[in-house]
Image (spheres, helix red, strand yellow):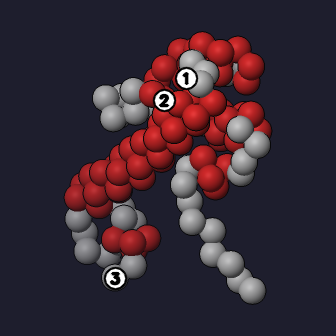
Amino acid sequence: MTLSRLFDPCNKAGNTRLCIYLSFIYSEVINMALATKVKEFLEEKLKQEKIDRKYLAEVTNIPYTTVSRIMRAEANREFNPEIDTILKIAKYFNCTMDEVIKRKVQNNS
């Protein structure tokens, strides 16, 4: 059974509540993984560049509260950085968004 079929609340198994719950849990896991990856990237880069959160917020035009929420990723389950925020981080550190979220890109050559 594919993931999309498992998390389809309209599947023919008739377990709509279970499917909705599993879909919610699945999205929570994905969101936590994303937030945690951005946090880990920032921790590493801030240390390497010897800059603090406040400076990063100023130069990227990301609200300081957003940077702080990213840095508390595990404790803040409901927060997930927006694409624009990830893009600003990538531009500042001169890297790709894939590098920020530690996504492995497959080479099709």
Q: Amino acid at mark 1?
A: Val
Q: Is residue 21 left or right of residue 39?
A: left
Q: Do labels 1 and 3 touch, CB within 8 Å?
A: no
Work out which residue is located at the far bottom of the displayed protein and give it: 109
The residue positioned 74% from the left and 19% from the top of the image is 59
The residue positioned 70% from the left and 14% from the top of the image is 58
Q: Nearer the viewer, mark 2 or mark 3?
A: 2
Q: Is residue 51 left or right of residue 95?
A: left
Give the quadrant of the C terminus. Answer: bottom right
Q: Residues within 10 Å of mark 2 (few under 14, many from 20)?
A: many
- The quadrant in which residue 103 appears is bottom right
Give the quadrant of the N terminus. Answer: bottom left
Q: Do labels 1 and 2 touch, CB within 8 Å?
A: yes
Residue 92 locus on image (x, y percent): 74, 34
Q: Is residue 84 above or below residue 22?
A: above
Residue where numbered disc 1 is placed: 67
Residue where numbered disc 3 is placed: 1
Q: Amino acid at mark 2?
A: Ile
Q: Amino acid at mark 3?
A: Met
Residue where numbered disc 2 is placed: 70
Residue 15 locus on image (x, y percent): 23, 65
Q: Is residue 2 above or below residue 60?
A: below
Q: Earlier in the sequence, mark 1 or mark 3?
A: 3
Q: Do labels 2 and 3 touch, CB within 8 Å?
A: no
Residue placed most toward the observer, 14 or 34: 34
Q: Nearer the viewer, mark 1 or mark 3?
A: 1
Separation of residues labelled 1 and 3 (CA atoms): 39 Å
Residue 70 locus on image (x, y percent): 48, 29
Q: Residues within 10 Å of mark 3 (few under 14, many from 20)?
A: few
Q: Secondary structure at mark 3?
A: loop
Q: Secondary structure at mark 1?
A: helix
